[in-house]
Image: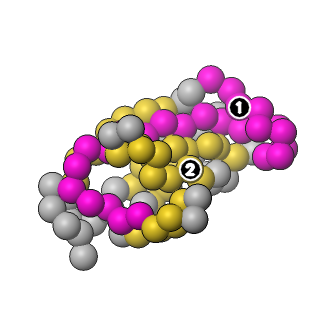
Amino acid sequence: MSNPPLLTWKRVKGARYYNLQVWRGKVKVLSTWPRDSKLQLKLGWTHNGRRFRLLPGLYRWYVWPGISRPASHRYGPMVGSSSFRVREHLT
């Protein structure tokens, strides 16, 4: 992999947004709420006040549709999950 991955999943009718979580091992490295059914990852980002980069390793991601206002934290059943591996430092 030479570029950060584009994560895509099945669009859910009526979903106003999605909750996407990315994990590296047992550490959640990203939680975000895109409005579309895809997200282009970047080389680096901030999550919970910590800075993260795509480092070599195995990543798993999960996504749920938001079925009401974001403040209500109501989600439907998981609509996607997969994994990707970063084999070298991306620049």
Which disc number belongs to residue 31?
2
Instruction: Give the alpha-carbon distance from disc 2 to disc 1, as whole Å.
Output: 14 Å
Please, what is the three-letter code of the amino acid marked with disc 2? Ser
Is residue 50 among the parts visible in the rendering?
A: yes
Residue at image location 59% in from the left, 38% down from the top: 11
Left or right: residue 40 compared with residue 3: right
> Quick one: label 2, few (<14), some, or many (20+) residues within 10 Å?
some
Which disc number belongs to residue 59?
none
Please identify the quadrant where the N terminus is shown: bottom left
Please, what is the three-letter code of the amino acid marked with disc 1? Tyr
Residue at image location 34% in from the left, 56% down from the top: 5
**Label 1 secondary element:** loop
Q: Nearer the viewer, mark 2 or mark 1?
A: 2
Left or right: residue 78 compared with residue 71: left
Residue at image location 56% in from the left, 50% down from the top: 31
- 10 up-or-down from 35: above or below: above
Please identify the quadrant where the C terminus is shown: bottom left
Residue 72 within the magenta-colored segment of the rendering: yes
In the depicted view, which residue is nearer to us: 45 or 35?
A: 45
- 16 up-or-down from 56: above or below: above
Left or right: residue 11 compared with residue 60: right
Q: Measuring from the top left, give residue 90's x and y in whole percent.
A: 23, 69
Residue 59 within the magenta-colored segment of the rendering: yes
> Quick one: label 1, few (<14), some, or many (20+) residues within 10 Å?
some
Q: Measuring from the top left, give residue 69's x and y in whole percent.
A: 84, 44
Q: Measuring from the top left, give residue 9's x and y in whole percent.
A: 49, 40
Give the labeled residue for mark 1.
75
Q: Measuring from the top left, give residue 22's x and y in whole percent.
A: 45, 46
- 89 up-or-down from 16: above or below: below
Is residue 8 among the parts visible in the rendering?
A: no
Magenta region: 52-77
